[in-house]
Amino acid sequence: MTLVGVAVGVALAVVAVFIPWLPDAASEQADIVDSVYWVVTIICVVVFAVVAGVSAYAVYKFRAPPGDMDDGSPIHGHTGLEIVWTLIPTILVTGIAVYSGVALAQSEELPPDHRIIEVSSQQFAWTFTYPDIEVEGGRPLSSGELVVPIDQTIRFEITSKDVIHSFWVPEWRMKQDAVQGITTHTTVKPTELGTFPVICTELCGLGHALMRSRARVLSEADFQAWVEEQKRLAREGGAIQGKELFTQQCGSCHTLADAGTTGEVGPNLDEVLQGVDADFIMESIVDPSAEIAPGFQDGVMPGNYGEMFTEPQLQGLVEYLVNATEGGAQ
Ligand code: CUA
Protein backbone atom coordinates (compact mmCIF):
# COMPACT_ATOMS: atom_id res chain seq x y z
CA MET A 1 0.00 0.00 0.00
CA THR A 2 2.77 2.40 0.95
CA LEU A 3 4.62 1.70 -2.28
CA VAL A 4 1.45 2.29 -4.31
CA GLY A 5 0.93 5.56 -2.37
CA VAL A 6 4.49 6.69 -3.10
CA ALA A 7 4.07 5.88 -6.81
CA VAL A 8 0.78 7.83 -7.03
CA GLY A 9 2.35 10.68 -5.07
CA VAL A 10 5.32 10.91 -7.41
CA ALA A 11 3.01 10.90 -10.45
CA LEU A 12 0.89 13.71 -8.95
CA ALA A 13 4.02 15.68 -8.04
CA VAL A 14 5.25 15.47 -11.64
CA VAL A 15 1.88 16.78 -12.86
CA ALA A 16 2.00 19.61 -10.27
CA VAL A 17 5.53 20.66 -11.27
CA PHE A 18 4.72 20.82 -14.98
CA ILE A 19 1.61 23.00 -14.70
CA PRO A 20 2.63 26.69 -14.76
CA TRP A 21 0.77 27.80 -11.60
CA LEU A 22 3.05 30.68 -10.68
CA PRO A 23 3.55 34.08 -12.31
CA ASP A 24 6.85 34.70 -14.16
CA ALA A 25 9.89 34.66 -11.93
CA ALA A 26 11.44 38.08 -12.55
CA SER A 27 13.90 38.47 -9.67
CA GLU A 28 16.78 36.59 -8.07
CA GLN A 29 14.58 36.13 -4.99
CA ALA A 30 11.79 34.62 -7.09
CA ASP A 31 14.01 31.67 -8.06
CA ILE A 32 14.93 31.05 -4.41
CA VAL A 33 11.30 31.29 -3.24
CA ASP A 34 10.07 29.02 -6.05
CA SER A 35 12.66 26.35 -5.17
CA VAL A 36 11.39 26.26 -1.57
CA TYR A 37 7.81 26.25 -2.81
CA TRP A 38 8.32 23.26 -5.10
CA VAL A 39 10.38 21.20 -2.65
CA VAL A 40 7.68 21.64 0.03
CA THR A 41 4.89 20.97 -2.49
CA ILE A 42 6.46 17.71 -3.71
CA ILE A 43 6.99 16.48 -0.13
CA CYS A 44 3.37 17.36 0.75
CA VAL A 45 1.90 15.68 -2.35
CA VAL A 46 3.78 12.42 -1.73
CA VAL A 47 2.93 12.35 2.01
CA PHE A 48 -0.71 13.13 1.22
CA ALA A 49 -0.93 10.36 -1.40
CA VAL A 50 0.54 7.77 1.01
CA VAL A 51 -1.68 8.74 3.96
CA ALA A 52 -4.87 9.16 1.89
CA GLY A 53 -4.19 5.92 -0.06
CA VAL A 54 -3.61 3.78 3.03
CA SER A 55 -6.62 5.35 4.81
CA ALA A 56 -8.97 4.78 1.88
CA TYR A 57 -7.80 1.18 1.54
CA ALA A 58 -8.22 0.52 5.28
CA VAL A 59 -11.71 2.06 5.37
CA TYR A 60 -12.83 -0.17 2.50
CA LYS A 61 -10.99 -3.38 3.47
CA PHE A 62 -11.74 -3.39 7.23
CA ARG A 63 -15.28 -1.96 7.23
CA ALA A 64 -17.85 -3.68 9.51
CA PRO A 65 -20.17 -6.09 7.66
CA PRO A 66 -23.90 -5.21 7.82
CA GLY A 67 -25.42 -6.17 11.22
CA ASP A 68 -22.03 -6.52 12.97
CA MET A 69 -22.46 -4.64 16.28
CA ASP A 70 -19.37 -6.12 18.03
CA ASP A 71 -16.59 -3.97 19.47
CA GLY A 72 -13.34 -4.11 17.57
CA SER A 73 -10.70 -6.49 18.93
CA PRO A 74 -8.44 -4.82 21.55
CA ILE A 75 -4.93 -4.00 20.29
CA HIS A 76 -1.89 -2.61 22.11
CA GLY A 77 -0.26 -0.54 19.41
CA HIS A 78 3.07 -1.17 17.72
CA THR A 79 6.13 0.54 19.15
CA GLY A 80 8.25 0.16 16.01
CA LEU A 81 5.54 1.69 13.80
CA GLU A 82 5.01 4.58 16.24
CA ILE A 83 8.70 5.41 16.23
CA VAL A 84 8.72 5.39 12.42
CA TRP A 85 5.71 7.68 12.02
CA THR A 86 7.09 10.11 14.59
CA LEU A 87 10.62 10.11 13.22
CA ILE A 88 9.77 10.64 9.52
CA PRO A 89 7.64 13.80 10.01
CA THR A 90 10.18 15.17 12.52
CA ILE A 91 12.98 14.82 9.99
CA LEU A 92 10.82 16.29 7.18
CA VAL A 93 9.58 19.30 9.15
CA THR A 94 13.03 20.07 10.60
CA GLY A 95 14.57 19.79 7.14
CA ILE A 96 11.96 22.14 5.63
CA ALA A 97 12.50 24.67 8.44
CA VAL A 98 16.29 24.71 7.99
CA TYR A 99 16.01 24.88 4.19
CA SER A 100 13.48 27.76 4.36
CA GLY A 101 15.64 29.62 6.89
CA VAL A 102 18.68 29.40 4.61
CA ALA A 103 16.58 30.53 1.60
CA LEU A 104 15.22 33.50 3.57
CA ALA A 105 18.70 34.58 4.62
CA GLN A 106 19.92 34.23 1.03
CA SER A 107 17.11 36.34 -0.43
CA GLU A 108 17.67 39.14 2.11
CA GLU A 109 21.42 39.31 1.41
CA LEU A 110 22.48 42.89 0.73
CA PRO A 111 25.51 43.66 -1.48
CA PRO A 112 27.36 46.95 -0.72
CA ASP A 113 26.21 48.59 -3.99
CA HIS A 114 22.47 48.24 -3.28
CA ARG A 115 19.95 51.03 -3.83
CA ILE A 116 17.45 52.16 -1.19
CA ILE A 117 13.87 53.01 -2.18
CA GLU A 118 11.33 54.15 0.40
CA VAL A 119 7.84 52.75 -0.06
CA SER A 120 5.14 54.83 1.57
CA SER A 121 1.57 53.54 1.66
CA GLN A 122 -1.71 55.18 2.52
CA GLN A 123 -5.35 54.61 1.72
CA PHE A 124 -5.23 54.00 -1.26
CA ALA A 125 -1.99 54.89 -2.95
CA TRP A 126 1.69 54.03 -3.10
CA THR A 127 4.52 56.55 -3.15
CA PHE A 128 8.07 55.54 -4.02
CA THR A 129 10.86 57.86 -2.88
CA TYR A 130 14.49 57.73 -4.01
CA PRO A 131 16.41 59.31 -1.10
CA ASP A 132 19.69 59.63 -3.04
CA ILE A 133 18.17 61.41 -6.06
CA GLU A 134 17.46 65.12 -5.60
CA VAL A 135 14.95 67.15 -7.59
CA GLU A 136 13.79 70.79 -7.60
CA GLY A 137 13.88 72.45 -4.18
CA GLY A 138 16.29 69.89 -2.71
CA ARG A 139 13.61 67.30 -2.09
CA PRO A 140 14.11 63.64 -2.97
CA LEU A 141 12.58 62.25 -6.15
CA SER A 142 9.24 60.58 -5.51
CA SER A 143 6.90 58.85 -7.87
CA GLY A 144 3.57 57.06 -7.89
CA GLU A 145 4.99 54.30 -10.07
CA LEU A 146 7.98 52.23 -9.10
CA VAL A 147 10.82 52.47 -11.62
CA VAL A 148 13.99 50.46 -11.05
CA PRO A 149 17.12 49.51 -12.98
CA ILE A 150 17.62 45.84 -13.84
CA ASP A 151 20.19 43.67 -12.02
CA GLN A 152 20.65 45.99 -9.06
CA THR A 153 19.68 44.86 -5.57
CA ILE A 154 17.07 47.13 -4.02
CA ARG A 155 16.35 47.48 -0.36
CA PHE A 156 12.75 48.62 0.11
CA GLU A 157 12.07 50.53 3.34
CA ILE A 158 8.33 50.28 3.84
CA THR A 159 6.07 52.49 5.95
CA SER A 160 2.37 53.26 6.27
CA LYS A 161 0.68 56.58 7.01
CA ASP A 162 -2.57 55.04 8.26
CA VAL A 163 -3.61 51.38 8.41
CA ILE A 164 -1.74 48.17 7.58
CA HIS A 165 -1.05 47.61 3.89
CA SER A 166 1.18 45.04 2.21
CA PHE A 167 3.68 45.66 -0.60
CA TRP A 168 3.81 42.96 -3.25
CA VAL A 169 5.01 42.51 -6.80
CA PRO A 170 3.97 38.92 -7.61
CA GLU A 171 6.70 38.42 -10.24
CA TRP A 172 9.32 39.32 -7.62
CA ARG A 173 7.67 37.08 -4.97
CA MET A 174 8.90 39.08 -1.93
CA LYS A 175 5.98 40.45 0.08
CA GLN A 176 6.11 42.70 3.13
CA ASP A 177 3.55 44.36 5.40
CA ALA A 178 3.50 48.15 5.70
CA VAL A 179 2.75 49.00 9.33
CA GLN A 180 2.23 52.46 10.78
CA GLY A 181 4.92 53.50 13.27
CA ILE A 182 7.62 51.08 12.14
CA THR A 183 9.75 50.57 9.03
CA THR A 184 9.74 47.11 7.53
CA HIS A 185 12.13 45.88 4.85
CA THR A 186 12.38 43.62 1.90
CA THR A 187 15.08 43.02 -0.69
CA VAL A 188 14.65 42.42 -4.42
CA LYS A 189 17.07 42.10 -7.31
CA PRO A 190 14.99 42.39 -10.52
CA THR A 191 16.38 40.19 -13.28
CA GLU A 192 13.84 40.77 -16.05
CA LEU A 193 12.87 43.90 -17.97
CA GLY A 194 9.16 44.68 -18.12
CA THR A 195 6.16 46.15 -16.36
CA PHE A 196 4.68 44.33 -13.38
CA PRO A 197 1.76 45.12 -11.06
CA VAL A 198 2.36 46.50 -7.56
CA ILE A 199 -0.44 45.16 -5.40
CA CYS A 200 -1.66 45.88 -1.87
CA THR A 201 -2.35 42.45 -0.36
CA GLU A 202 -3.73 43.50 3.01
CA LEU A 203 -7.44 44.35 3.24
CA CYS A 204 -7.12 48.03 4.11
CA GLY A 205 -10.50 49.65 3.46
CA LEU A 206 -12.94 50.63 0.74
CA GLY A 207 -10.32 51.19 -1.96
CA HIS A 208 -8.17 48.13 -1.18
CA ALA A 209 -8.86 46.40 -4.49
CA LEU A 210 -7.86 49.58 -6.33
CA MET A 211 -4.65 50.13 -4.38
CA ARG A 212 -2.40 49.23 -7.25
CA SER A 213 0.50 50.75 -9.06
CA ARG A 214 3.06 49.38 -11.45
CA ALA A 215 6.72 48.48 -11.30
CA ARG A 216 8.80 49.16 -14.40
CA VAL A 217 12.18 47.48 -14.70
CA LEU A 218 14.46 49.37 -17.10
CA SER A 219 18.01 49.05 -18.36
CA GLU A 220 20.52 51.20 -16.46
CA ALA A 221 20.59 53.75 -19.33
CA ASP A 222 16.78 53.97 -19.56
CA PHE A 223 16.58 54.33 -15.79
CA GLN A 224 18.99 57.29 -15.85
CA ALA A 225 16.92 58.83 -18.67
CA TRP A 226 13.76 58.41 -16.58
CA VAL A 227 15.47 60.10 -13.61
CA GLU A 228 16.48 63.06 -15.79
CA GLU A 229 12.94 63.31 -17.18
CA GLN A 230 11.48 63.33 -13.65
CA LYS A 231 13.91 66.07 -12.65
CA ARG A 232 12.86 68.12 -15.66
CA LEU A 233 9.15 67.63 -14.95
CA ALA A 234 9.58 68.59 -11.28
CA ARG A 235 11.36 71.77 -12.42
CA GLU A 236 8.98 72.82 -15.16
CA GLY A 237 5.50 71.69 -14.16
CA GLY A 238 2.84 72.43 -16.77
CA ALA A 239 -0.38 70.76 -17.84
CA ILE A 240 1.30 67.88 -19.68
CA GLN A 241 3.15 66.85 -16.57
CA GLY A 242 -0.07 67.47 -14.63
CA LYS A 243 -1.85 64.85 -16.70
CA GLU A 244 0.90 62.32 -16.09
CA LEU A 245 0.84 63.06 -12.38
CA PHE A 246 -2.94 62.71 -12.33
CA THR A 247 -2.87 59.34 -14.07
CA GLN A 248 -0.21 58.01 -11.68
CA GLN A 249 -1.47 59.43 -8.41
CA CYS A 250 -5.15 60.29 -8.64
CA GLY A 251 -6.68 58.05 -11.30
CA SER A 252 -7.05 54.96 -9.11
CA CYS A 253 -9.59 56.86 -6.99
CA HIS A 254 -11.07 59.44 -9.39
CA THR A 255 -12.89 59.14 -12.69
CA LEU A 256 -11.77 61.68 -15.30
CA ALA A 257 -12.71 61.16 -18.94
CA ASP A 258 -9.77 63.17 -20.33
CA ALA A 259 -7.23 60.99 -18.50
CA GLY A 260 -9.17 57.78 -19.17
CA THR A 261 -9.34 56.93 -15.45
CA THR A 262 -12.31 55.20 -13.85
CA GLY A 263 -11.64 55.16 -10.08
CA GLU A 264 -14.73 55.26 -7.89
CA VAL A 265 -13.31 55.74 -4.40
CA GLY A 266 -13.54 59.53 -4.65
CA PRO A 267 -15.92 61.87 -6.52
CA ASN A 268 -16.16 61.79 -10.33
CA LEU A 269 -14.14 64.85 -11.32
CA ASP A 270 -15.97 65.29 -14.63
CA GLU A 271 -18.99 66.11 -12.46
CA VAL A 272 -17.70 67.85 -9.32
CA LEU A 273 -15.17 70.11 -11.07
CA GLN A 274 -17.68 71.56 -13.55
CA GLY A 275 -17.68 75.32 -13.23
CA VAL A 276 -15.17 75.60 -10.36
CA ASP A 277 -12.04 77.74 -10.51
CA ALA A 278 -8.34 76.97 -10.13
CA ASP A 279 -8.27 78.08 -6.46
CA PHE A 280 -10.99 75.59 -5.56
CA ILE A 281 -9.11 72.79 -7.31
CA MET A 282 -5.85 73.69 -5.55
CA GLU A 283 -7.61 73.74 -2.18
CA SER A 284 -9.25 70.37 -2.89
CA ILE A 285 -5.81 68.87 -3.54
CA VAL A 286 -3.80 70.29 -0.63
CA ASP A 287 -6.65 70.42 1.91
CA PRO A 288 -9.24 67.82 0.87
CA SER A 289 -11.16 68.19 4.14
CA ALA A 290 -12.08 71.82 3.37
CA GLU A 291 -15.08 70.81 1.32
CA ILE A 292 -16.43 67.27 0.92
CA ALA A 293 -18.52 66.33 -2.11
CA PRO A 294 -22.03 65.10 -1.16
CA GLY A 295 -22.08 61.35 -0.57
CA PHE A 296 -18.34 61.09 0.23
CA GLN A 297 -16.49 60.84 3.53
CA ASP A 298 -13.88 63.12 5.03
CA GLY A 299 -10.50 61.51 5.69
CA VAL A 300 -10.46 59.11 2.76
CA MET A 301 -8.32 61.30 0.50
CA PRO A 302 -4.79 61.77 1.91
CA GLY A 303 -4.16 65.32 3.15
CA ASN A 304 -0.45 65.49 2.37
CA TYR A 305 -0.30 66.03 -1.40
CA GLY A 306 0.74 69.63 -0.70
CA GLU A 307 3.95 68.32 0.85
CA MET A 308 4.50 65.46 -1.54
CA PHE A 309 4.38 67.43 -4.79
CA THR A 310 6.63 70.35 -5.71
CA GLU A 311 5.02 73.74 -6.36
CA PRO A 312 5.47 73.38 -10.16
CA GLN A 313 3.89 69.93 -9.95
CA LEU A 314 0.86 71.26 -8.05
CA GLN A 315 0.45 74.14 -10.50
CA GLY A 316 0.71 71.72 -13.43
CA LEU A 317 -1.89 69.44 -11.91
CA VAL A 318 -4.33 72.30 -11.33
CA GLU A 319 -3.71 73.68 -14.81
CA TYR A 320 -4.40 70.26 -16.28
CA LEU A 321 -7.61 69.76 -14.26
CA VAL A 322 -8.91 73.19 -15.24
CA ASN A 323 -8.34 72.37 -18.93
CA ALA A 324 -9.67 68.82 -18.66
CA THR A 325 -12.94 69.78 -17.00
CA GLU A 326 -13.37 73.10 -18.79
CA GLY A 327 -14.30 74.46 -15.40
CA GLY A 328 -11.81 77.30 -15.45
CA ALA A 329 -13.50 80.57 -14.53
CA GLN A 330 -10.05 82.09 -14.35
CU1 CUA B 1 -3.78 49.05 1.06
CU2 CUA B 1 -5.07 47.06 0.74
Image (cartoon, helix red, strand yellow):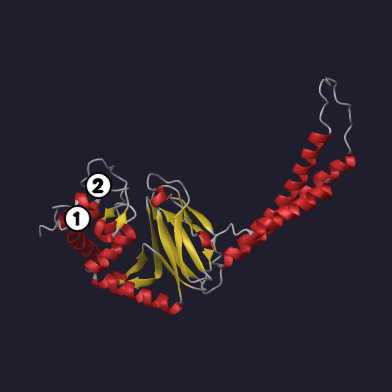
Camera-side residue: 291 or 250? 250
Q: Residue furthest front?
A: 66
Location of mark 2 (residue): 289
279 left or right of 2 in image: left
Camera-side residue: 44 or 188? 44
Q: Quadrant of the C terminus?
A: bottom left
Element marked by disc 1: helix
| Quadrant of the rendered image containing residue 22 | bottom right
Q: Residue at x 32, y 48 (%)?
A: 264
Camera-side residue: 212 or 279? 212
Is residue 34 among the parts visible in the rendering? Answer: yes
Is residue 310 among the parts visible in the rendering? Answer: no
Q: Earlier in the sequence, mark 1 or mark 2?
A: 1
Spatial CA distance of label 1 from label 2 is 13 Å
Location of mark 1 (residue): 281
Q: Are marks 1 and 2 in contact (CB under 8 Å)?
A: no
140 left or right of 290 in image: right
Q: Position of residue 254 (x, y in %)?
A: 29, 52
Q: Quadrant of the N terminus?
A: top right
Q: Residue at x 52, y 56 (%)?
A: 175
Rate crowding at label 2 as few (under 14), some (14 to 19) or many (20 or more) other CA atoms within 10 Å: some
Q: Residue at x 19, y 52 (%)?
A: 273
Q: Position of residue 126 (x, y in %)?
A: 39, 57
Q: Position of residue 147 (x, y in %)?
A: 42, 68
